[in-house]
Image: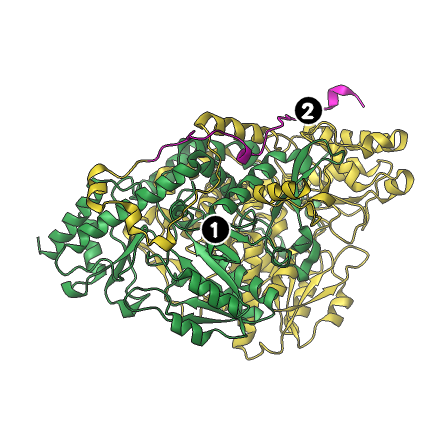
Amino acid sequence: MEGEKMFKQASWNEPVILSKGRKGRRGHLLPKAEEQVRQTIGDINALIPDRMRRKTCPKLPELSEVEVVRHFTRLSQMNYGVDSGFYPLGSCTMKYNPKINESLANLESFSMLHPCQDESTVQGILEILYKLERWLAELTGTHEVCLQPAAGAHGEFLGTLLIRTHHELNGEGEKRKEVIVPDSAHGTNPASAAMAGFNVVVVQSNEDGCVDLQALKAAVSERTAGLMLTNPNTLGLFEKNIEEVAKIVHEAGGLLYYDGANLNPLLGKARPGDMGFDIVHINIHKTFSTPHGGGGPGAGPVGVCEELEKFLPVPRVAFDGKLYHLDYDKPQSIGKIRSFYGNTAVLLRAYAYILSLGLEGLKEVAEVSVLNANYLMKKLKGIKGLALPYNSEKPRKHECVFSAKPLKGDTGVTALNVAKRLLDYGLHSPTIYFPLIVEEALMIEPTETFEKEELDRFVDAVQDICEEAYTNPEAVLKAPQNTSIPRLDEVRASHPRTMALSWRMYLKKQKQEQ
Amino acid sequence: MREIGIRSIEELFSDIPEKFRLKRKLNVPEKGLSEFEVKKHVEALLSRSETCNDMPVFLGAGCWPHYVPAVVKEIAQRSEFLTSYTPYQPETSQGMLQALFEYQSMICEITGMGVANCSMYDWASALGEAARMAARVKGRHEILIPKIISPERAAALKVYAEPAGISVRQVEFDAEKGHINLEDLRNDISDKTAAVYIENPSYLGFIETQVDEISKETHANDALFIVGVDPTSLGILRPPGDYEADIVIGEAQPLGNPMNFGGPLLGIFTCREDMALVRQMPGRIIGMTTTQDGTKNGFCMTLQTREQHIRREKATSNICSNEALCSVVSAVYMALLGPEGLRELGETVMYNANYAVHLLSKIGGVKAPVFKSAHFKEFTVNLDETGLSVKDVNQKLLGRRIHGGKDVSSEFSELGQTALYCVTEMHSRDEIESLAAALEGILGGR
């Protein structure tokens, strides 16, 4: 390994904040009640019924402002983001998050708006939400879009509830209890279907990595409520038989659900609605460039065909030709899946993104993301130790999935080890061990926002690591060494005796040990 | 393109059937705009907004105006946090993991609970998940909730509960105080009850005082006690852990997150340190551990076998993306305030709100609050005796550049023409007095 290819992440040994500070320190002073207010009201403690008064202060740390700033700045330096470097996490679409969107979302003319304000005082944001709904409906080929879900999985939950409501209204709620998902599906699909009260039926993929039509035909029945599918699928392959798939499901009386995690390569090129999907969710924090924030907040709008619109959560954003309104008069609505109207700060960023790129730009996003994925596939294909299962000649869409099974067989180095070693190069690892139908999977999604030089650097790193696995496997097995911290004891983390899920739990266990 | 041997990018899309390939224009702007044009456009749209910077706004009801310190904004924009994904690779994500662990830990301190997850979407969805968790833990399918509850939370609860076969029953309130009617609770609770849920402070702002009785009654029936909180009250109000809550949920938006027109919010989710409960929790949980050589502490996601990416249809929840960055924000906020700051915040809010109550209740025809109870930061204002509707009065207030409280007269028709007012540390004495003067003027026909 050449030293110049390696990086070194900050490693601060920063103590847990609850163990820091000194009595009496304060990081921030809020305004206090004015003297006249205090005098008028008298002792506040007399207002609180004695049995409800807090007697002991919470054990929060006592720190100065600069201590807090340093602590969290140091923590941030021990974290890797898209702004730090290459982030080919498959199915996560880790693209660059334009800075202009951040500054717009932080405008106080937006951030200081209360959701219950009079409509006359919030026309601007309502117009943004209304137009965003229209654009997303156009881009997905759906009739109406609901912006409320807070995440992709939340959108899936809404979608599966819509399926349930649709069948109930048709008097088939008791009968149609099965949702079909392919074995390559994201884990959220079966979890969402189960949450909405369905039984999950799994269909196998065929040797092409796509839905097996025969298996699907065998799986559908009068019990079928719907099929959840992502297209392109998690192998990065376009389900070319989608028309046939839709026909089979629809003829059986089921609805077709589109998991939007992989929408990026279709932007402006093809639309799920045109392919027969009845419900489509969109991961705003993937396809529409909003930051993932270390796990959220995202947004998961749901588009539906005309027939299902009446079931969408209230309120709907409406426009009467002059003014924008929040319309609660939807008697067949399923109700609410959260408070208010959605993660509007995230949605505002998506609005700015679409405005910045236009349809032409979005099309280019799709094209370059696919070009990058295929470039990586081509370059990685020759590397000893890696296999490309499922139709290695077929172009991929947004991502490609390699298998490190040969490498493991030859050297004992697993996909996990390769992933950890990549971290030593200052690169993020691909998604690993997913989809489940590929052993030792390395799922790679480069997105459109990395340069060819970055892609080449990644390919070189993978090449180096695979060679190293054959020549010096120990070096790969003990990776990572250049990150803030080496490998963690995850068994210890989840063992009841050592588990520490909060600082107080940790202190308690320490005490018990002594 | 040369490297992969294609002449046109379209070759890479050749597997999409011809009929599905989009060839026409869409009703989406065709050409992109420059950054400057985008900025101008969005700013112009939003400049039509009127915010609480432009006029006093007395709205709460699940999303509250609180000051966001500059430090909090700064840390929230650290791009290493902002642009990272869920910390699947812990070695390179220690910063996020530790910050989330600290959020969990501080939420435990203020609620008095043992374990917290690192976020739910909001209070409403947290309530839905809490009901489902209680049903799994107890193998029972009924949950009791107070009649005085946010209608949005109640609606979300219903949507979450129904597919799991959970029925929701509402317990009557004491007409004078607004508190849970204990007799009604005793009548409704049974061996079918998975959980009893209360909110403190309640949706209408009063403090529920019978927490020990409710807790006892719940546990006597072997049900779980779920409490929903506004965490800004917990510097001065008893933490639910103290009255033996099993699950505490709530809304942490007011801990440093701006209102953002109602989203993102930040759902609190905690439970007692009891593995039978912890194993049924929804959402991501960060644990503290050591490196494999045992020399250093470190952090990672743990108990993942509850989650969708491992358990699929048998997962405790489908939640995946959550509100992680908002949790970091709240961690920074709690660290800045410390125990004294949180107490002062609670006191200031309660002083200001009660000052508003004091002034408004002196106005002829106005009843504030409706219930004879202690109120924290929100309170009801009834206008029945004035002969005017909340809607009319609010329009008139708006004409005087004041935004009145939320009209709850259709949500709680039994309370007549009633508005829900919210006052925080951001409302100055001047603003509160101008509200009182404006109301007096409007009702006096001036």
Which kind of residue does numbered mark 2 sit on? Lys
Q: Is mark 2 on a helix, strand or loop?
A: loop
Give the x, y percent position of residue B246: 53, 58
A308 or A314, which is in the foreground?
A314
Give the x, y percent position of residue A340: 41, 55
Q: Which residue is drawn at 79% across and 41% down?
A: A415
Q: Which chain is green?
A: B
B239 relative to B84 in the view: left or right: left
B146 relative to B406 in the view: left or right: right
Query: As drawn, which residue projects farthest toward the front?
Result: A514
Give the letter of the chain under mark 1: A
Which kind of residue does numbered mark 1 sit on? Trp
Magenta stretch in the rendered image: A1-30
Give the x, y percent position of residue B100: 56, 41
Task: Quickly name the residue at label 1.
Answer: A135
Q: What element carries label 1?
A: helix
Give the letter of the chain under mark 2: A
| Residue A3 magenta | yes
